[in-house]
Image: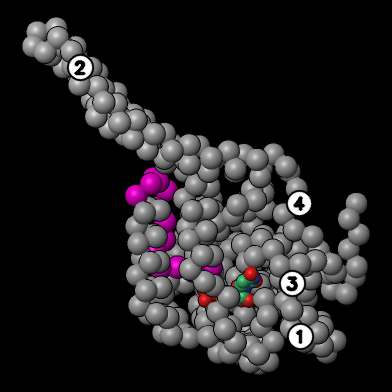
Amino acid sequence: MKKISIIIPAYNEEESLPMLYDRLEKLMSSMQNYEFEILFVNDGSKDKTIQLIKEYREKDNRICYVDFSRNFGKEIAMIAGLDYATGDCVIFMDADLQDPPELIPELVKYWEEGYDDVYAKRKSRAGETWLKKFTSKMYYKVLQSLTNVPIQKDTGDFRLLDKRCVNALRKMRETQRCSKSMFSWIGYNKKEVLYDRDPRVAGKTKWNYKKLIDLAIDGITSFTTSPLRISTYLAIPTFLALFIYFIYVICKMILVTHKIDAYQAIILLILFFSGIQILLFGIIGEYLGRIFNETKNRPLYLVNEYNGKREENE
Ligand code: UDP
Ligand code: MG
């Protein structure tokens, strides 16, 4: 019997969990010919999330959990899920039921047909603000314009991945993670499934605009070094302008005025070049920061316990 691992990152989700468990239980009993593992990654929740998960595990050993030592963020929770999943395929799902579990049989159907990465694409997004939809659309546009790897539009993390995608993703240990671009990067046979994204069943969203902007910057810089090329593009016309202006000033001095009206020219030039330098330093700093983070070579996350067993850090 094939085993399906459903990975669910959860951060302060005590209100959604009972409904989630109900819907998952119905789903599992409707798919009798598969074995299931529901792997919660408790991302340092401050409410009763982990207690609830442990209660579920007591009565149902298909429930597994990885309990983080603190909040590490959803991206890290996802890689931890991949590390601990034991199934022949994994399915990522949010704990707030925005991704309907009822779509899972369809994802599995395509997996059985031989697709490795079956991703659910949103037809609609109920319960999300106009601004959030607009910003996420712009983000995809920018990300796509910077790279040759095709990025799937309007897809969240709700998707099914075959074992070999899981193995590929496990090898990608970078600290600043952007799963979306990683899913594109690994390639393999992809299949799109359309669905309507529901509003959150309970609780509040954990996102705010600062987190989203951070994610966007991480996504772009971890995926491509083309922002570094901005410096080249800016520098070429700047030096050209400098060269022409220099010739012009010299010629004018020799032929017409015999002196340079330097004061304004110098101020303008200083402003101009210091502006560009600041911009470039900013970009270089971005990448330096990333190199710094990677070279530290820290583990991506620390686990407090796995299925009730205390993890020792060797
Ligand atoms: N989440 C997490 N760690 C965090 C923030 C969120 O594991 O630091 C989980 C959260 O519990 C949920 C999923 O990520 O299962 C999506 O979060 P949310 O619904 O808040 O995001 P949105 O759907 O609004 O983008
Ligand atoms: Mg949500």
**Label 1: few (<14), some (14–19) or many (≥20) C-alpha neighbours in 10 Å:** few
| Sooner in the amino-acid sequence: mark 3 or mark 4 | 3
Q: Residue at x 90, y 51 (%)?
A: 314
Mark 4: secondary structure: loop
**Label 4: few (<14), some (14–19) or many (≥20) C-alpha neighbours in 10 Å:** few
Q: Amino acid at mark 1?
A: Lys
Q: Which residues are magenta?
A: 145-158
Q: Nearer the viewer, mark 2 or mark 3?
A: 2
**Foreground pick, 65 / 217:** 217
| Sooner in the amino-acid sequence: mark 4 or mark 1 | 1
Residue at the disc numbered 2: 260
| Sooner in the amino-acid sequence: mark 2 or mark 3 | 3
Residue at the disc numbered 4: 299
Residue 3 image offset from top left, x and y in percent: 70, 71
- Specify the label residue 44 is tagged with: 3
Residue 154 located within the stretch drawn in magenta: yes
Q: Nearer the viewer, mark 3 or mark 4?
A: 3
Tell me if the residue at label 3 has its CB under 8 Å from ligand 1: yes
Residue at the disc numbered 1: 48
Residue that sits furthest to the top in the current view: 254
Mark 1: secondary structure: loop
Report the Cα–Cα distance between label 2 and label 3.
66 Å
Mark 3: secondary structure: loop
Q: Is residue 314 above or below residue 309?
A: above
Predominant SS of the magenta segment: loop
Report the Cα–Cα distance between label 2 and label 1.
74 Å
Residue 1 in sight from this viewpoint = no
- The reply to whether callout 2 and callout 3 are in contact (CB within 8 Å) is no
